[in-house]
Amino acid sequence: MPDPTDLPDTSTDTSEDDTGYEDPNDPYDIMGLAHHFSMSLKVALKTAMMKFQINLTKIFSNQANELHALGDMHSSYITGETPDIGAVTKRANDFAKDYEKELVEKGGTTINGKFVPWLNDRVESERQEIAKIITDGIKNGDTTDQIGEALSKHFDGYRNQAKAIAHHEGGTIISKGQLSGWDASGHTAVDVLDDEGPNSCQECSDVNGEVWSIDYANDHAKEHPWCVRSFSPKDPNEEWSLDEE
């Protein structure tokens, strides 16, 4: 993850100075001043969003530990076994460390078997969108109230996206905790429970009722942000065939 204190020196950076202003430092050149305000704003937003990314990573990592343990404990409840609290705690701690490492070093997590840099992409696009709303407002001569209203609408949309991310990551981690618990107790496969009724997407409908290995289920815990996919352990004494691709 980039160091939030390692900021570019914009005093000589002309890479984004495509305005054609002859003397942007002229106090009477209002458009030049607006342009340089825009550049300073981008630097400030970059710093703020980097700090936001660090804090968000910590929040997700802390929740990962608790949610994984919750799923692991629930796996014992489903099978009627007595959970080993020490083992559950260790598995949760190990998962949370790996989860945080992936967020910090790569800026995302593995979704449906593929790594997706959703945190890096979200933070970068958010920084650009906020900067654009403010600088466009300044260039258009909007009042602070008008700019504030535009930002408010933007953050309303972001809150909905944040809920989707939290739902997906939280649900995925709980499922991984369950799968970890079943794996530790000797189960090797699970039934896929993925029936959302008339609102089911085709991918979810297609896999509902299939039998997957623990490893495959771990990589495909959720199909989409609002996915309700869950699993039920197969009896190790029964015979079955795997349906995974």
Image (cartoon, grey):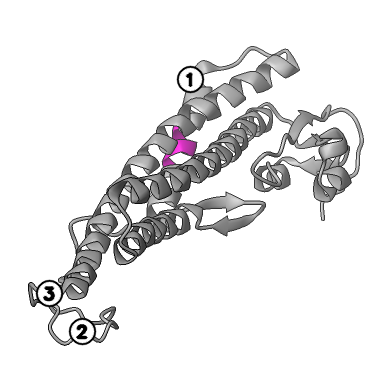
> Quadrant where the N terminus lies?
bottom left
Q: Which amino acid does label 2 sit on?
A: Tyr
Is 210 left, or right, of 27 in this rendering? right
| Disc number placed over residue 21 in the picture, else none | 2
Q: If you read the primary sequence from the N terminus, does the residue marked by circle 2 or circle 3 appear first?
A: 3
Q: How far apart are marks 3 and 1 (CA)?
A: 56 Å
Q: How crowded is the residue under tag 1: few (<14 C-alpha within 10 Å), some, or many (20+)?
A: few
Q: How far apart are marks 2 and 3 (CA)?
A: 15 Å
Is 29 left, or right, of 203 in this rendering? left
- What residue is shown with label 3? 11
| Disc number placed over residue 158 in the picture, else none | none
Q: Do the residues labelled 3 and 1 touch (CB within 8 Å)?
A: no
168 relative to 104, above or below: above
Q: Which amino acid does label 3 sit on?
A: Ser
Residue 240, position in %: x, y?
91, 38
- What residue is shown with label 1? 86
Nearest the eye: 245 or 171: 171
> Quadrant where the C terminus lies?
bottom right
Nearest the eye: 234 or 11: 11
